Amino acid sequence: MSKVAFVFPGQGAQYTGMGKDFYENFDRAKEVFAVANEVSGMSMEELIFQENENLHITKYTQIAMLTVEIAILKVLQEKGIHSEVNAGLSLGEYGALVASGVLSVHDALEVVVKRGAYMQEAVPTGGAMTAVMGLSNDVIEKVCGETEGIVSVANYNCPGQTVITGEEDAVNRAAESLKEAGAKRCIPLKVSGPFHSKMLEEAGKKLAQELEKVEIQEIDIPYITNVTADYVTDKNQVKSLLERQISSSVCWQQSVERMVQDGVDTFIEIGPKKTLTGFLKKIAPEAKGYNVETIADLEKLLEVLA
């Protein structure tokens, strides 16, 4: 028997029309959109299905992504596809929390509306993120530590791909040093701020206040947090981990390695694009990876699992 993990992508994978065929064909998906419309006071249908710039603005992107991820998740569950463990990259962790029964759909969407807004408000001018290709994490961490100003690792995505974050000048200086140290490429990312750096701590504090209003349920299905790349066993840790997650490194590579070590051999990426499935090929090429962003993907997956 294979051991299945559901994994959920983060901000950056969004595109106009994502999740539309699920919305049009499944009542369970429509119900999730209705909840998102209610908690956000916006039309998710307009935001996600019609061409507009808002979809790429953080405070709108996050609610849009999570709406689509939960909509697809609910259809998978309705079709009898279930997981033994869940995880998500950055924003995607909220999809994992819903899949694990820790947050209700309503509460997850409500928190993410605030998370997106707080992250956008907290973004100081002069923040940046850069992807570093072809260099070990040890060298990247060392260079960041030796660079003047605020710069640190934002994402450990997969072997050979790590993202750094912080003050723009510091990130640029670190990138130059990393090229000298042997990085194949350093690619500045088109993002609206230095996410997962200590410059976002204020957003985390505001989010903590929002999380106080939310009930954390028992953890039905194990989930792994970005902050420690390990299982969360005590539901009382969830809120503080979500606060820290905004300004901490995303330990995605380590999270996948932890799941594989625990016997997970099948990863189902729920949501737009195939970012995490691509990372999986580099982290654990022996594992099976599937992504579900369209009904055609779902039908293919049902055939495979049958």
Image: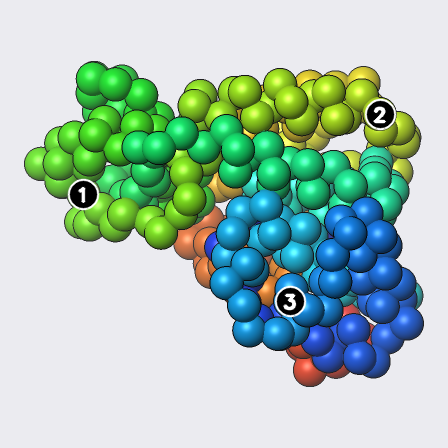
Q: Amino acid at mark 3?
A: Ile
Q: Nearer the viewer, mark 2 or mark 1?
A: 2
Indicate the position of residue 155 as horizontal and vertical percent values: 43, 38
Indicate the position of residue 280 as horizontal and vertical percent values: 50, 54
Residue pointed to by mark 3: 48
For the residues labelled 3 and 2, say whether their Cβ atoms are less than 8 Å apart. Answer: no
Above or below — where is 249 with respect to 162?
Answer: above
The quarter holding residue 165 reads: top left
Q: CA distance from mark 2 to mark 1?
A: 45 Å
Query: Is 20 placed left or right of 32 in the picture?
Result: left
Q: Amino acid at mark 1?
A: Ala
Q: CA distance from mark 3 to mark 2?
A: 28 Å
Query: Is 143 placed left or right of 6 in the picture?
Result: left
Residue pointed to by mark 1: 183
Residue pictured at 78% horizontal, 73% vertical: 23
For the residues labelled 2 and 1, say whether their Cβ atoms are less than 8 Å apart. Answer: no
Residue pointed to by mark 2: 213
Q: Which element carries disc 2, helix, strand or loop? A: loop
Nearer the observer, 304 or 173: 173
Above or below — where is 5 with respect to 122?
Answer: below
Query: Is 177 placed left or right of 259 in the picture?
Result: left
Nearer the observer, 110 or 234: 110
Q: CA distance from mark 3 to mark 1?
A: 37 Å
N-terminal label among 3 and 1: 3
Residue pictured at 77% horizontal, 74% vertical: 22
N-terminal label among 3 and 2: 3
Structure colour scheme = rainbow
The reply to whether residue 266 is in sight is: no
Q: Which of the image's four quarters has the N terminus?
A: bottom right
Residue pictured at 61% horizontal, 41% vertical: 116
Residue pictured at 50% horizontal, 29% vertical: 122
Count of marks, rendered view: 3
